[in-house]
Each structure stands twice: as C-alpha cells, then as structure tokens.
Image (cartoon, rainbow, N blue to C red):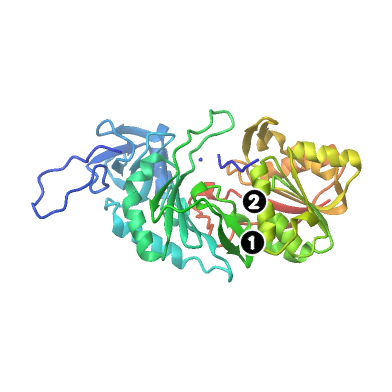
C-alpha cells in the first residue's frame, strides 16, 4: 500500500496607483487590508510561535474572505499578531510572519536561503528536502530536491497565491531543470478521502515519463518528480537506513509495505543473504526491481511478491518461514480491495503477525508517520501486539528524521516520525 500522509482569489481592494507601477495580478499577496480577530487561546499559541489559527479560534473578520487572501491577524484588543493567508478550512489561517509586513518575493527568498544554509547534507546525496513547511517558516509548503528537478507540495489551494514568486526564487537559487507542483491535502480515518488535485509542471520543459535517477548516500534510486509527493523515495528515512548499514549482513530480511524497495536495496547491498519485498502495488514492485538493477544487484536472487502484507505474513507463518529482520513501514490509513487499514486500530495486529515470522532474537523495525499518534500510543500498540504472541520487545535504536526534516519546537505536529528497531 502506498503511504498516506493523512494532508484564484479576487484582486485585492486598493486605491489608485502611480501610472509607472506594474499591474498586480489577481490574487497577488501585495497588501493585507483585511483582518481576522482571534480569541485568547489562539493569541497565546501564536505568542509561543505556533503558525496556525484554527477555524474555531476566529471570532471576527472584516468581511467575507476567499481562500488565498492575505490577512492581518489581530487580538481582541486590536494588537497585530502577524500576517497570514486565509484558507477557510480547519486550519483557517497560516501565519507567515509575526508583524504586519508583506508576503512577497523578498520574504520568500529570505526563508528559502535560510533553509538551504541549515542543510549540510551527507556526500553522494542528490535527493533531499529543501523546505519543510512550518519548520522552515513557510507553513503548508514543502520543496523536495530530486537531482535537478524540484517538487513543490502544498497543503492547500489557498497557498497557490505564493507560487509565482516562489518559483522565481527557486529558479534563482538552484540550477533546476523542472519544477513540479503536487498536493498534500488533509484527510483522516473517519473522513472522506481528500480531493485529488491535478499535479502540474510549473517550470521547465515537459519531459517523457522516465525515472530520474538520484542518490541517497551513494545508493541509486529511480524517482518520478511528476508523481509528487509520492515520488518513489521517502528521504525522511535516510538516517534510519544509514544506521542499519552494518546490521544487514548475513540476515534473511522481510520488507513489508515496501513501496519501491529502498530498504530492500540497502539490505541487499550491505550483505543480506535473502530479501523478500512485499507490496500490494505491482507497479511499485517493478520499480523496486529497477532499483536493484540501478545498483548492480540481481533481483532474481531475491523474492518480490505482490500481495497484501497480512496475507504474505500469514502464508509465511503457515510454511514455518522465519526471518532475522522484519521491516514494516505501513501507511497511516489506506483503502484497497484487501480492506481498510488504520494504523491506530490495526498496529497491534501487524506487530503480532510480524513476530510470528521473526526468529528468536531477531529484529523488528516498525515505523509510523502519523503525527497524531504519540510515542506513548505507539509504544502501547507495540506492547499490545507483542503480548498477543507472548514475546517481549527491547528497543535497540530509535530512528529520527535527518537534518533536512527539522522539527520546530513551537510546532509540535512536526515530530511525526516514530521508527523503532526492536529485538524480540
């Protein structure tokens, strides 16, 4: 199953301008004549640096607003709390600055350059995240570098108002071939799926749909920037894969929810004697085999299986197969012919099924990218699953996101990744 991330305005009113001034395009974030008033709860959170205003925290506004409108955020007493973009969803306003200044190309350039300076990357790595949304002071905006291609991912259509200036800044700051637009609209377990918006080319020539080959610490992987945000590589797991490098040798490995097989490639490159790669999508498995070939590995020396991960686990349990290391990085939510998956509900069942095919003393890597699942809830689900089969788990490594996925302390939602390697 693919990972689920579970996530034009009218012309601004203005007076006459000098004839020499260039015309402003509709929806341009030039001035912010409109304002929204927030309650005291929101004011306290904004004072601590939190960049969102939720819909139930807005107590008033100057007029009916359209998504993409730049607004001044004010307290009940009229104090300026910042400038943001009106959305109209659950996150009603995303705050981009704490004063009443403009949201223009100069501000975007300052944030983009500062984010690049914060990212000393490992050698032989050409796939990385340049802008990590709220954690780089650009809420709702992500920019991923894939060689010479860039992917801009937006959390909401309201942020399109910044696209023209953002693309211009990125082109100035990076020798890029193409820039693609993708979406990360929010949905949840109990809501209808988020609407699907068209991905599109923002800059550069239209290229044939061939894999772009990039490197992660010297490991080659094929990505598809036009398929963002699911391009074929989850770079937030880079440091976890680096930590595992000395531990693959001599092991039989089972990689579930494998997607394009990056964990499988790393295992085979670093001495695993046999790697089983399981994913429900046949296209993902074809790409996993290509990734083996990109690294001069023979996919025929290993096992690739198109199947639901639970069915694959049960088949191996019935045959008495055991593995030295099981990798499971499931999506947060998923709907397919095999049923509905929810990590909050089904994680203990997955842990138990994995442990039934794990050698005594073997390692289980279990991960969740669901930000609303706390480390405490994650631990409880792991323990519950282990208790079902009478096994105990000991954490040998807690993985974290790499340097290009920073987590701002004033934005708790950014610490989303739980990735534990455990001995059973």
Residue at the farthest front position = 208
Residue 287 - label:
2
- Quadrant the N terminus occupies: top right
Left or right placement of residue 74 versus residue 253 in this view? left
Q: Nearer the viewer, mark 2 or mark 1?
A: 2
Closer-to-camera residue (369/92): 369
Residue 71 - label:
none
Q: Could one spot residue 235 in this view of the protein?
A: no
Q: Is residue 290 above or below residue 376?
A: below
Q: Is residue 102 above or below residue 74?
A: below
Q: In the rendering, at what x and y percent does residue 351 appear?
A: 77, 42
The residue under the point 8% across, 52% down is 19
Secondary structure of the residue carrying tag 1 is helix
Neighbor class of circle 1 (other Cα within 10 Å; few <14, some 14-19, many 20+) is some
Residue 239 - label:
1
Q: In the rendering, at what x and y percent does residue 313 appear?
A: 81, 40
């Amino acid at each position: 199953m693919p990972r689920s991330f579970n996530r034009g305005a009218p012309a601004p009113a203005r007076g006459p301008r000098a004839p020499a001034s260039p015309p402003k395009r509709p929806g341009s974030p030039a001035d912010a004549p409109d304002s929204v008033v927030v309650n005291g709860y929101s004011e306290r959170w904004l004072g601590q640096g939190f960049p969102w205003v939720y819909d139930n925290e807005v107590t008033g506004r100057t007029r009916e607003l359209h998504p993409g409108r730049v607004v001044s955020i004010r307290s009940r007493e009229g104090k300026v709390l910042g400038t943001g973009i009106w959305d109209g969803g659950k996150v009603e306003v995303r705050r981009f600055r704490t004063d009443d200044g403009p949201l223009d190309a100069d501000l975007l350039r300052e944030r983009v350059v500062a984010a690049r300076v914060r990212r000393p990357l490992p050698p032989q790595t050409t796939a990385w995240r340049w802008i990590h949304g709220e954690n780089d002071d650009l809420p709702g905006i992500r920019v991923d570098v894939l060689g010479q291609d860039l992917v801009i991912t937006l959390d909401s259509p309201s942020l399109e108002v910044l696209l023209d200036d953002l693309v211009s800044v990125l082109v100035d700051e990076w020798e890029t071939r193409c820039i693609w637009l993708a979406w990360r609209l929010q949905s949840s377990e109990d809501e209808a799926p988020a609407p699907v918006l068209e991905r599109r080319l923002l800059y550069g020539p239209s290229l044939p749909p061939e894999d772009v080959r990039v490197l992660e610490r010297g490991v080659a992987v094929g990505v598809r920037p036009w398929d963002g945000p699911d391009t074929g590589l989850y770079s937030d797991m880079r440091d976890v894969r680096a930590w595992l490098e000395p531990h693959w040798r001599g092991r039989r490995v089972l990689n579930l929810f494998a997607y394009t097989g990056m964990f499988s490639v790393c295992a085979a490159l670093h001495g695993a004697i046999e790697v089983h790669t399981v994913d429900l999508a046949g296209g993902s498995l074809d790409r996993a085999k290509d990734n083996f070939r990109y690294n001069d590995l023979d996919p025929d020396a290993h096992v690739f299986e198109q199947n639901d991960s639970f069915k694959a686990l049960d088949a191996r349990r019935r045959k008495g197969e055991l593995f030295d290391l099981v990798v499971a990085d499931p999506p947060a939510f998923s709907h397919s012919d095999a049923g509905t998956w929810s990590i909050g509900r089904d994680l203990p069942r997955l842990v138990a099924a994995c442990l039934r095919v794990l050698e005594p003393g073997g390692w289980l890597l279990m991960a969740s990218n669901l930000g609303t699942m706390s480390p405490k809830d994650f631990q409880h689900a792991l323990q519950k699953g282990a208790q079902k089969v009478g096994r105990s788990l000991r954490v040998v490594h807690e993985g974290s996101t790499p340097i290009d996925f920073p987590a701002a302390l004033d934005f708790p939602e950014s610490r989303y990744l739980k990735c534990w390697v455990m001995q059973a």
